[in-house]
Amino acid sequence: MYFPKFFHPDPTVIRQSGLLKPSLNNSSILGSSVTIPYFMVLNENKDFTFKPSLFDSNIQMIQNEFRQKNNKSEFIVDFGFVKGFKSSVSNTKKNLNHLFTKFNLDLDLKDFISSEMEFSIQKTNNDSYLKIFDNYITNSRVRPEDFTTLKNEIKISLDHNDYNFTTGIESYENLQEGNKSDKYQYILPYYNFDKVLSGNFLKGSLTFTSNGRNDLNNTNQLKSNVINDISYRSQNFINNNGIVNSLNVDLKNLNSIGKNYSEYKSSPQMEVTGILSLDTSLPLVKNEKNYKSYLTPKISLRFNPNDMKNNSSANKKIDVGNIFNLNRLGFTDTFESGKSLTLGLDYKKEKSNELNEINKYFEFKLATVIRNKEENFIPTISTLNKKSSNLFGSLENKFSDQFKIGYNFALDNDYNTFEYNNLNATLLFNKLKTEFNFIKENGEMGDSNVLENSTKYIFNNNNSITFKTRRNRKISLTEYYDLVYEYKNDCLTAGIKYKKTYYEDRDIKPLEDLLFTITLFPLTSYEYSSN
């Protein structure tokens, strides 16, 4: 489509200045709008997109994105301005703006495999801005992935043949905290260093890691630490009976100081702690015609003679996927205290086709932890603080390429109460695909009850219908419904969407929309809403 001085490039054009696909939109918050973006090629390594939007509610929005790519660097900046937006919370008009930018630079330092610097900024002057104008910044490559947190960062990463080193500064803004000063967190600075000291030390490997950070949170809570770790991982020792044994030893040096922080003292402290782990397993294999079965009993004995930091309220959950990890609680400044014995059993039976591809299998895992006494500083939600933890398990059965079911659970140590249930299933039947996910938590492991479903039916190459929903069964509330019918061919996409949401977040109100959408490639798109 050609106009004097203006071009509308078709999809075969790689890079051409001109009008991009305009769009008509309707929002229950912003009203109806029209957006006409223009793409401008500045030179061979720079371009710019100008994207104005006009609303029938007297709101004007301008979004701009500038991109530059050089031989050893890349720079993207997305900045926008909104005039005339009236908040339903404060009932006042306020101009809004945002700035998202990212800069990557190859430092090209000698003797390093790679050396990079990254700089990024995420800033808005309204906490609900990202949710309100979500549909207008969808093509931005630098917009935040999480609409509840903004992150600003400077980071340098060095990768050497002998070690890896990363350092930088970070700041976070929690958009859920309103205008409180507690919404900000600053890490000034941090570093991470790791190095393999020896790959053949006492028939194992010896590694050294060091990390440190200054963390200012909740206005006046400050903690600073430098943590040095030396880790030994032995090779697997297999005896004549097929029993596999391995030894792991970790030593930790924690240097810390804190202010208004319960876990760290206000005067400098130095601690040295260690943990030892002896892992034993007996892998068994049975070969049958068309089937192969695996059975592996596992034991892990752990001993830490030192106390740990008080993390009883930390949200650290355990399942069969991480229960045998040495740092299964995920703490960097402390080890799990006490003596414990982790017991587990893995079973898997699989069937292969003529091409040796696994097309059917059944897998079952069980694990639990016992210890000589209760440890009050271990997170309660994990249940590892008890003499006998929950019994964790998982079951997965792939009946065929069309049907698969999975189940994860945690059974209380009285073996009468399920504190965690997660059931998921996937069904493919000709042109129908449906997925279910059910999660229920109670007792010490949480308090939730959620059911999700996603179903899609493809009538033919041009027609399909999709349905998605999520229900909070604890409070008998369906959080949303999404029902979409879509027709698509090479130059046209048309559809009907029904959306209903029940949640409320400041200027975001519960809504019910019936939308008709049509897109003509590459000319324009139109969306009409009836709510």
Image (tube, helix red, strand yellow):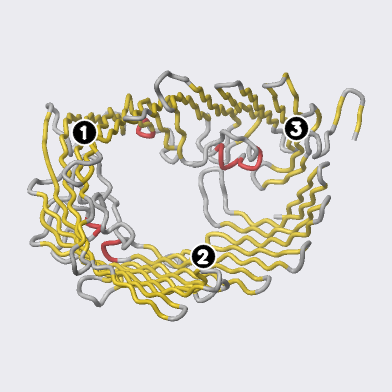
Q: Position of residue 445 (x, y in %)?
A: 29, 61
Q: Position of residue 309 (x, y in %)?
A: 16, 44
Residue placed under numbered mark 3 in the picture? 37
- Spatial CA distance of label 3 from label 2 is 37 Å
Q: Quadrant of residue 110?
A: top left
- Spatial CA distance of label 1 from label 3 is 51 Å
Q: Identify the residue at image location x=53%, y=73%.
A: 353
Q: Position of residue 319 (x, y in %)?
A: 31, 61
Q: Secondary structure at mark 1?
A: strand
Q: Residues within 10 Å of mark 1 (few under 14, many from 20)?
A: many
The answer to whether the residues at label 1 and label 3 have Cβ atoms under 8 Å apart is: no
Residue placed under numbered mark 1 in the picture? 227
Q: Secondary structure at mark 3?
A: loop
> In terms of sequence position, does the residue under pointer 1 or pointer 3 come before the other?
3
Q: How many marks?
A: 3
Q: Secondary structure at mark 2?
A: strand
Q: Amino acid at mark 2?
A: Glu
Q: In front of the other: label 2 or label 1?
A: 1
Residue placed under numbered mark 2 in the picture? 452
> In terms of sequence position, does the residue under pointer 2 or pointer 1 come before the other?
1
